Structures are given as structure tokens and as C-alpha cells.
Amino acid sequence: MLLPSLLMRVAVAGSTGFLGTNLVRKLVSSGVQTVALVRNTDKIDVMTKLGSTPALVDYTKPETLERALRGAEAVFNFVGASAQSPASPFDASNVTPARNLVAAAVAAGVKKMVYNSGLGVNPDNTLGYFISKSECERITKESGLNFLIFRPSYIIGSGDEFSSYIYRTLLARKEVPVFGSGDYRMQPVFIDDALKVYENSLRLTEVWNGVYDLVGPNKVSFREYVSLVAKTLGVTAAFRSVNLEFALRESMMPAIHRKENSSLSVDELCVLISDFVADHTKLTHDFGVTLTPLEKAVKRIVMDLT
């Protein structure tokens, strides 16, 4: 059942990231009263200019979250990190915020929670990143709230971290490092499609208490994706093969000592090569969306860059 309007108050946790900022902008443009949870005071003006109501929070202090969530009907949890360190392990960056957001939402009387997990989460996965996401899913499912869990592949759009790295490298006429074969697949979903799914979820009733793979219509290898971006940019893709064992070893070194893998953590590298893909049929059917073909999505991103 599709409800007629979006006259509600919605909170976005993780509002200052690529996905959160775009969702805040989308909800505000649709007339939704949007509360943007922020951790730093320097982001308050940014969220205000987008038309949202910023709320300064500390994800280690549920009382600050409860104040921010009062009066909200739904909350989107986009808080999380894809890499960890001794100073910020996944338990602190992913699990604790999820646990405290759930507690605060229940205390504040929120009815619905949307959690962004990750494509590849399953009971048998042994990677730290996926294990933390799996725990966040469990916390969300057992919250007593109506929940929606999305497991996205790479969400691409103007300014997303993954694509931006590839675009910058190609435009600088530098070689793109390929870790291992480069034949591992991904299923990028265009930001506009993801935002439409999120927005529609607020109008729909039957989708709640479900888990959905948030993926695009095209499955491509890493090499194919880079080649498509290069073709769209009008440049030639140059690749540099990097031994996977060497890349993994480097990912555990301080960044200043790395030569081939300058930015990816162990978990980020393992996610990249994981080869997780999914069927998008249930997503498109239940949320009433038509997914943007990958080639068209990349063209849209290039247009935004130029």
C-alpha cells in the first residue's frame, strides 16, 4: 500500500556523509521535516542551508540522541565506517552507534528505523566489517521497531568516495591499480535510485520488517567499471597489476610506508574483491522503482564533474 504523502518528521543519522547529505536534500525537497544529526558544530550551518533542522549529538551518549529523535516518526541510520583502527574499532564506529540509536529511538517514541548494512552480510562471513554490520542488523531487528534493512553495493554518484578516486586517477592520466585479477564483480547502484527507494519506503507499508539488497541493474567486474568510466571521460584506461598478497600485506602497514595500496584498509580491500552480487527484482518490484543503467549513471556523474 502506498500512502498519499510524506507529511512527517524524519531523522537522518550520518547526515554529513555522501549518502546522508543527499538524502537530507531529497527529503527536504519533498516537504519532509528533516532532522540532521551531526557530531561537529561546523556542520550545523551546512545542514541548515539544506533546509533541515540540525541536531548536535554524541553517539556514545544516548540522551543526546533521544533529544534529537523526539517527534520523529522514522530514523535513517547511515552511521558507520568501512575501516577500523585501534583508536576506532568497528565496535565503536558501527555497533555502538547502532545500539544507542535503537535505544534512543525506542525511548523517544520513534516507530520506524532504516539501517544501511552491506551487500555480503551473511551468517557465515568472517570479515570484521561484515561481522559488525551483521551485529547492527541483529540489534535493529530485535529493537521492537518497524525496521528496514538495506544491503547496498557501491552507491555511486557525484562525490562518492569510490568513484571519485577512480575519476581523479583517470583524469590525472595515472594508472589504476588492480589488486589481483580485477575480474571480481560489483553491482553499483546510482544515488538517485537509492534515494528514491529510501523516499518510497516512507510511503509504503508492506516493505517494513524486510531485508533488501540495494543493487543496480548491471553486474560488472572492477576492470569493466574502470574502463566504462574512462570511456565516458574520453580517456584511455591504464591499469597496473598489483599482487593481491602484497596489497593485503601493505594494507596492514602505516600509510606512509605503502607503495601500491595507499588507501585501502584490509576490510576495504576484501570488500572490493568479494564478488558479491544480487538479484534486484524484489527491490524494484516492492519499491516501484526503475533502476538507472550503469552506463547512463556514469554519464550523469561525468556531466556533474564537467
Image: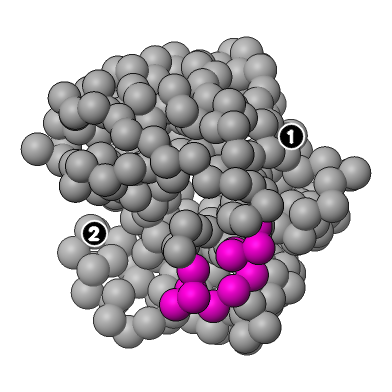
Q: 231 or 179, which is in the foreground?
A: 179
Residue 154 vertical position relative to residue 256 in the rendered view, above or below: above
Q: Main secondary structure of the magenta part?
A: helix
- Residue 287 in sight from this viewpoint: no
- Taking 270 as reference, is 80 left or right? left
What residue is at 84 percent from the left and 52 percent from the top?
126
In this figure, which residue is indicated by the disc labeled 1?
210
- Looking at the rendered structure, the kind of residue marked 1 is Gly
Q: Quadrant of residue 103?
A: bottom right
In this figure, which residue is indicated by the disc labeled 2?
51
- Looking at the rendered structure, the kind of residue marked 2 is Gly
N-terminal of the two: label 2 or label 1? 2
Contact between marks 2 and 1 (CB within 8 A): the answer is no
* Classed neighbour count for the residue bearing mark 2: other residues with Cα under 10 Å, few (<14), some (14–19), many (≥20): many
Q: CA distance from mark 2 to mark 1?
A: 30 Å
Residue 289 in picture, x, y percent from top left: 47, 18
- Taking 116 as reference, is 56 left or right? left
Q: Which residues are magenta?
A: 248-258
User: SS for tag 2?
Assistant: loop
